[in-house]
Amino acid sequence: MNKILNKNFYKQDTLKVAENLIGKYLVKDDEAHMIIETEAYDGPHDKASHAHKGRTDRTEVMFGSAGLWYVYLVYGMYWMLNIVTSSKDYPAAVLIRGVKKFKGPGILTRELGVTDKFNNKPADESTGLWIEDREKEIEEGNIKRTPRIGVDYAKEWKNKPYRFVLKKD
DNA sequence: TAAGTGATCTCT
DNA sequence: GAGATCACTTAA
C-alpha cells in the first residue's frame, strides 16, 4: 500500500524526518525514486542553515508549515530540493541529496525537472511532486550518519552528523 | 583541482 | 549599486 506522506510526518523533529525519509520514494508524476541520502537543517541556531541569520525573502518558506517544498538555486546552476519540517515559525528543512537513480542533489533536480516553480508549494498531488511510503522497510542499522557536505563555513556545526545515507539496499 | 554561474545578502 | 559568498558539478 502506497501512502503519501502528510503533514503529520513532516511535523516531527527534523532529524527524525531526515532519517525516516531514507528508503521512502520521491514521486514525480508517474516516476518513483527511492531516497538514499538526506541532510537536516534544523533551527535558527544551526549555522549551516540559510535561516540562521533570520527571516529573509528566500528563507521565509523554512519558517512556514511542514510539508512545503523549499527550492532554491546555488552556484548559479543547480536547484536544491528541500522539504520543510517541524513547527510553523521554527525554521527547519531536510535536503533531499540523492535518490537511487540519480546521485547528487543538483543532478536529481536537473533530471526530474525540479525548479523554483515548486518553491513554497505543498508536497502532495496538487503539485505532482510528493514523497510516499511503500512496503519496504529500512532497518535502522542500514542507515549511516555522517557530517554534512559543503558546509565548512559553519564552524562548530559543520561536524554535526546531520547527514543520512542508505548503506545498501 | 579549478572554474563556471547567477541569486542573495551585506555593505555603501 | 558593488562586491562577496555559496547546502554543486564537470572536465582535466
Image (cartoon, coloured by chain):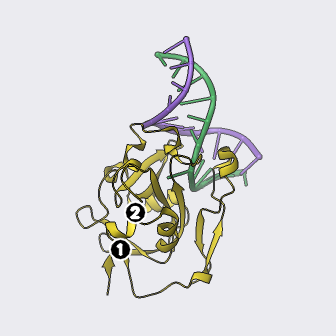
Chain colours: A yellow, B purple, C green
Check disc 2 and give the amino acid type.
Answer: Leu
Marks 2 and 1 in Cβ contact (< 8 Å) = yes
Q: Position of residue A159 (x, y in %)?
A: 69, 56
At a point 40% along the width and 88% down the height, the residue shown is A135
Q: Position of residue A31 (x, y in %)?
A: 35, 74
Q: Secondary structure at mark 2?
A: helix
* Count of marks placed on residues: 2
Q: Which mark is residue A112?
A: 2
The foreground one among A78 and A14 is: A14
Q: Position of residue A1 (x, y in %)?
A: 31, 87
Chain letter of disc 2?
A: A
At a point 41% along the width and 49% down the height, the residue shown is A62
Q: Secondary structure at mark 1?
A: strand
Mark 2 closeness class: few <14, some 14–19, many ≥20 residues within 10 Å: some
Reading the image, the residue beneath label 1 is: A31
Please tell me whether residue A90 is drawn above or below residue B2 in the rendered image.
Answer: below
